[in-house]
Amino acid sequence: MIYNKNCLDALKDLRDQSFDLCITSPPYNMRLRIQHGKYTTREKTNHFSKKYKTFGDDMPIDDFYKFHSDVLSQLIRVSNLTFYNISIVTGSKRAFFRLIGDFSEHLKEIIVWDKKHPAPSIKNGVLNRRSELILVFGDNPISRVFENANWDRGFLDDLWELGRGRSEINTNSATFPLSLPTKILSMFGFDNCRVIDPFLGSGTTAIAAHDFGYDFLGFELDLETFILAKQRIENHKKQLKLW
């Protein structure tokens, strides 16, 4: 099931540990930048205005931290295991670094997603961003052993070379590839697994969960994105029926 709702409001209505896996990728605050030593909103350009059609993606850094802190607190309560995909950019890094420290008792692992082809830097002296991080919370975090591991000893690394995602709907070009949630579900999923994605976006996690036959719940705030994601999911289901 998917709903056009604010994820934070929706998460508060869910029971403790009502889901087994959360796979999600929140906004990165791409349009917040530093100018003259202070945070400011980046001007809209072809590169920085196309990530989200109706969302500014430029929250003040303290508000950005507070929002993610509230969301993570709910996800850790609601889901046994949470895969939180983030990118370290100017508008997010202070908040995400702080979150890693503040949630260290819940942080089990950090996986590096190698997108193979880096996004070019926007100016001289800036590293190309080739990787993103997947913060893994929950599942007895003091231990490195995963309770429902579907791989043999020595098989799975913490560096995943999966390439970049491509835009599937016009309102949101910030998407991860289907191979990412598919890999997580294949390595950590199990019979009757319950999956949640509070930042539904184009619906990629929903499609992966459907392919595995898992129960799914997702939320998307933007109505136009929600409608297009719903259509994409339904089209995928129809294609599977044809085959």
Image (cartoon, rainbow, N blue to C red):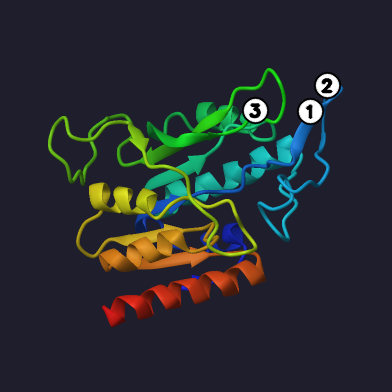
Q: Is residue 126 left or right of residue 212?
A: right
Q: CA distance from mark 3 to mark 1?
A: 12 Å
Callout 3 secondary element: helix
Q: Is residue 37 left or right of residue 179?
A: right
Q: Earlier in the sequence, mark 3 or mark 2?
A: 2
Examine the image and state in which quarter residue 137 appears. top left
Instruction: Identify which residue is drawn at 78% across, 46% down.
Output: 45
In the rendered image, residue 231, in percent from the top left (x then y), is placed at 51, 76
Q: Is residue 88 above or below residue 215?
A: above
Q: Is residue 28 above or below residue 200?
A: above
Q: Amino acid at mark 3?
A: Arg
Q: Estimate how packed mark 1 is, as few (under 14), some (14 to 19) or many (20 or more) residues with alpha carbons within 10 Å.
A: few
Which residue is at the far left?
152
The mark that comes first in sequence, 3 or 1, is 1
**Residue behind mark 3:** 94
For badge 1, the amino acid type reads: Ile
- Residue at left 56%, top 30%? 129
Question: Foreground: 90 or 175?
Answer: 175
Q: Which quarter of the figure has residue 167?
A: bottom right
Q: Is residue 80 visible?
A: no
Q: What residue is rendered at 32% in x and 48% in y? A: 184
Type of amino acid under label 2 = Gly
Q: Observer-nearest residue: 104 or 4?
A: 4
Residue 118: image location, x then y, percent:
53, 33
Measured as percent of width and height from the top left, residue 130 is found at: 50, 31
- The reply to whether discs 2 and 1 touch (Cβ–Cβ < 8 Å) is yes
The residue that disc 2 covers is 37
Q: CA distance from mark 3 to mark 2?
A: 14 Å
- In this rendering, the answer to whether 234 lies above or below 159 is below
Residue 34, disc: 1
Q: Residues within 10 Å of mark 2 (few under 14, many from 20)?
A: few
Please provide percent x and percent y for residue 17.
Answer: 36, 55
